[in-house]
Image: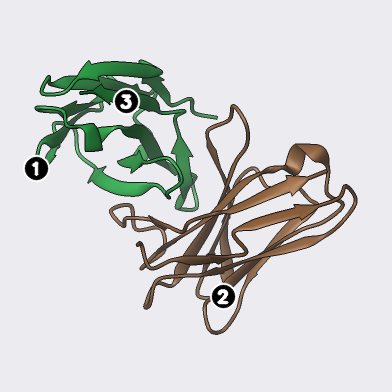
Chain colours: A green, B brown
Amino acid sequence: ILNVEQSPQSLHVQEGDSTNFTCSFPSSNFYALHWYRWETAKSPEALFVMTLNGDEKKKGRISATLNTKEGYSYLYIKGSQPEDSATYLCALLMYSGGGADGLTFGKGTHLIIQP
Amino acid sequence: DSGVTQTPKHLITATGQRVTLRCSPRSGDLSVYWYQQSLDQGLQFLIQYYNGEERAKGNILERFSAQQFPDLHSELNLSSLELGDSALYFCASSSRTRQYTDTQYFGPGTRLTVL
């Protein structure tokens, strides 16, 4: 069983500041790494799907990088806004021999943006 | 709104009972995934169906079963319920199976409380 670790567990950031957090994993034996954003009382919303070492994705003020050799992915938020407050989930799509399985999720980083 | 619908939103039942959770995928999506979010646990993959056939199994208990019907909606059946089965159950859908770049779109979830 692969452990997907996310750090920190929670993070308080001042509005306007930039921030980043980490998803780490011990093995590169997966197909893809997914980032999701999960707001309270809503369902997880897909941000990025990353597949290659050195992959970099960007969506507005949010970007992500993937380093499969070192076993981590970073999510960056530039100029944090109150609406960025959410739990950010990292998940791996594992290789199971017969193909890909469902996503293996980390426990998330809970981000709170303080006005 | 992801386009994935789940019913009911909330369900309260007693130990030993059986319940059925329902999911309708996004229009055109052939894959359906079920996930469980328990207290203090990350999202756990339960099972995947593709176009009516079971394709991958995760941490699904023997007391739980699922199926996908010809109209592509899916049902998750939970029987002999225990207190520990209380959780948020999510359904997600994607367009294909075992395609690692596919985004999984999550429904709003069903909150199950077992008393």
State left or right for residue B13 relative to residue A33. right
Q: Amino acid at mark 2?
A: Gly
Q: Which mark is residue A111?
A: 3
> Which residue is label 1 attached to?
A60
Mark 3: secondary structure:
strand
Circles 3 and 2, Cβ within 8 Å, touching? The answer is: no
Chain letter of mark 3 equals A
A70 w.r.t. B54: above or below: above
Q: Is B71 left, or right, of B82 in this rendering?
A: left
Do the dots labelled 1 and 3 sit on one chain? yes
Image-based side of A64 in relation to B34, left or right:
left
Q: Are marks 1 and 3 in contact (CB under 8 Å)?
A: no
Identify the amino acid type marked 1: Gly
Please give the chain letter of the residue carrying mark 1: A
**Residue that appears at 15% across and 28% down:** A80
Give the total number of marks visible in the rendering: 3
Discs 2/1, front = 1
Image quarter of the N terminus of chain A: top right
The label number, if any, that marks residue A92 in the structure image: none
Residue A112, above or below A61: above
Q: Nearer the viewer, residue A47 or A18?
A: A18
Q: State the residue position of label 2.
A: B52
Q: Residue at x 33, y 49 (%)?
A: A45
